[in-house]
Amino acid sequence: MKIYTSRYQNPELSNGSYTVVGITRGAPKFPLRYVLAGNIIEIAPPGYLFNEYDRTRFTRPYFANMDRVGVARIRSILNQYLALGKDVVLCCYEDVTKPGEWCHRLVFAEWWKARTGETIEELQDPSTYKAKQGSSLILPKKESEKPKEPEPEQLSLFGLQPPIA
């Protein structure tokens, strides 16, 4: 069995093939199409990093926090979820398929790889960016490239107006 990361709104999660676990400071306030098996608060960023949006400034203190928690503690928690018999997906909110987006789940995966040698991959997300054959991405068309829909005819509240001569 494998461990993945993803976002709560990944439609792939609704197929029932995964044990989905939050790694956030709170549960999603929007409806989910799957059962959330639990939350690992130990992987969520500590409060003092919550509003740090620069990945470089975020990484060192996050790694230090994860080192305090420790690989043994995280592995013990993950093993409890793996014992349920499905691949485990660790979720937070951000859509990291968008250019320039990142979040703590990616930094956690880096920390885990650095400390254990084990890779945690991002679960495929079929919703926003479709993967081509291979690993490149097909980005959605820009608004200017999309075909224009015809403007709807503006109807008059009072019926047809006679043409002005």
Image (cartoon, rainbow, N blue to C red):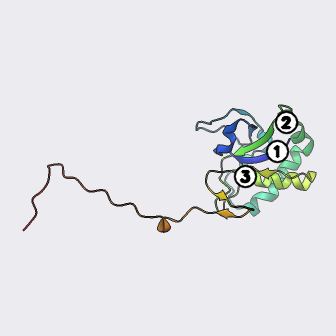
Relative to 51, 148 lies left or right:
left
Mark nearest the camera among 1 and 3 is 1
- Labelled pair 3, 2 in contact (Cβ < 8 Å): no
Examine the image and state in which quarter residue 138 appears. bottom right
Q: CA distance from mark 1 to mark 2?
A: 8 Å
Q: In the rendering, at what x and y percent does residue 153 appear?
A: 27, 57
Residue at the disc numbered 3: 49
Q: CA distance from mark 1 to mark 3?
A: 24 Å
Q: Provide the secondary structure element on which disc 3 rests.
A: helix
Q: Earlier in the sequence, mark 1 or mark 3?
A: 1
Q: Provide the secondary structure element on which disc 2 rests.
A: helix
Which amino acid type is marked by label 2?
Leu
**Front position in the image: 97 or 40:** 97
Q: Within 10 angstroms of label 1, few (less than 14), some, or many (20 or more) residues?
A: many
* Residue 45 visible in the shown view: no
Say if 68 sits above or below 143 in the image. Answer: above
Q: In the rendering, at what x and y percent does residue 59 appear?
A: 79, 58
Q: Within 10 angstroms of label 2, few (less than 14), some, or many (20 or more) residues?
A: some
Q: Which numbered marker is on residue 82?
A: 2
Q: Which numbered marker is on residue 3?
A: 1
Say if 143 sits above or below 79 in the image. Answer: below
Relative to 72, 87 lies left or right:
left
Which amino acid type is marked by label 1?
Ile
